[in-house]
Amino acid sequence: MVVKIVTDSTSDIPKEVAEELGIMVVPANVHFDLDTFRDGVDIQADQFYHRLMTGPVLPKTSAPSPGLFKECYDGLARESHEIISIHVSSKLSATYGSALAGKQDISNCRVEVVDSKLTSMGLGLLAITAAKAARTGAKI
């Protein structure tokens, strides 16, 4: 079975690339005042930048919940016995900690959570490289 790769939306991996390589992207939350959006799901980059430029408040972000990571890992555990979950730097976000908490009850699959110490396309390129290695049969 192929190792499954998970990252978060701060990786900025284009949706088409993530789909082609089988990378699961867990969305971060974007908050504009009282409005909350899942990055790349409820709000796309062009909508984000439009709101950023025209709106009265600056956005804030928050990490995906541990429950969202658990749901992701549970789904992938049906397809593989190994998951590498690579995330934005723990110095910038609580995402890494949330991913660690989400793997706690996963017993039928090995889940390795990695603090990439990166963000944006640095993180994205790391996830892409891992997915390409997994396709060639690389193990954790």
Image: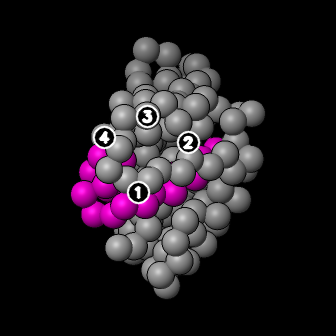
Question: Please, what secondary structure does the residue beneath circle 4 have?
Answer: helix
Picture coordinates of residue 85, whole percent (x, y): 52, 52
Marking on residue 73: none
What is the spatial separation of the Cα atoms under label 4 and label 2, in whole angstroms? 29 Å
- Badge 2, how many Cα within 10 Å: few under 14, some, many 20+? few
Disc with the residue nearer the chain's start (2 vs 1): 1
**Badge 3 element:** loop
Q: Which residue is mark 2?
A: 49
Numbered tag placed on residue 71 in the rendering: 4
* Quadrant of the drawing holding the N terminus: bottom left
- Indicate whether residue 85 is drawn in magenta: yes
Residue 76: x and y in percent read 32, 56
Work out whether residue 135 or residue 37 is closer to the camera in this orientation and state it. 135
Q: Give the residue type at disc 2.
A: Tyr
Three-letter code, disc 4: Glu
Of pointers 4 and 2, the one earlier in the residue sequence: 2
Q: Quadrant of the C terminus?
A: bottom right
Residue marked by disc 3: 104
Contact, CB < 8 Å: mark 4 with mark 2?
A: no
Q: Secondary structure at mark 2?
A: helix
User: Which mark is in front, 4 or 2?
Assistant: 4
The magenta segment:
73-88
For marks 1 and 3, give the one nearer the viewer. Answer: 3
Element type where label 1 sits in the image: strand
